[in-house]
Image: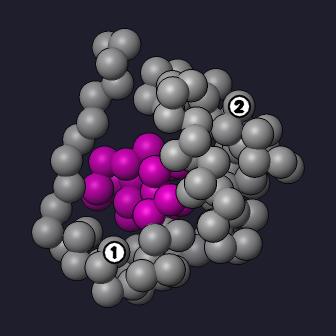
Amino acid sequence: MTNEEIIGMVQAKFPGIYPDDKVGILLGSLNKMSPLIKFGLEEYLKNGSNLDINLLGYSINELTTKHGMNPFAAYLTLDWIVRDPEKATASLKKGHDFVKPSNI
């Protein structure tokens, strides 16, 4: 799956949260994403199932249910944990903000 296909599917699944003017940011995130995390994201987008990936106690389920993230944000967060585990886990332990889409 190409990055453009992934972005299209993410925008379709989460309309208003990832608008066209943010595509460059999404593309940058996808370009540097760990292959395992990207594969998991593709599986989620294709068939709605999540791989059982657990990094330092964080999983898609944990991030979506306990941290209020949508699945795409959870995959980006798991990728952040892969790339910079100390900063990512410190940030997760501090808490998080909820972002409301502009179209709601």
SS at badge 1:
helix
Tag 2 secondary structure: helix
The picture places residue 67, in percent across and down from the top left corner, at: 28, 56
Residue at image coords 60%, 29%: 11
Question: Which circle's residue, 2 or 1, is located before the other in the chain?
Answer: 2
Q: Which mark is residue 8?
A: 2
Relative to 79, 90 lies left or right: left
Residue stretch rendered in magenta on the structure = 60-77
User: Left or right: where does residue 64 sit relative to residue 90?
Assistant: right
* Residue 89 visible, this angle: yes
Instruction: Return the residue nearer the eye: 65 or 3.
Output: 3
> Which residue is at a point 46% across and 21% down the rendered structure image?
16
- By secondary structure, the bulk of the magenta-drawn segment is best described as helix
* Residue type pointed to by label 1: Ala
Q: Amino acid at mark 2?
A: Gly
Instruction: State the residue lying farthest toward the left.
Output: 94
The residues tagged by marks 2 and 1 sit, at their Cα atoms, a distance apart of 27 Å
Instruction: Kindly identify the residue that appears in the image at 51 percent across and 27 percent down.
Output: 21
Q: Which mark is residue 88?
A: 1
What crowding class fits label 2: few (fewer than 14 Cα within 10 Å), some (14-19), or many (20 or more)? some
State whether residue 85 is above or below residue 104: below
Q: Position of residue 104 (x, y in %)?
A: 32, 14
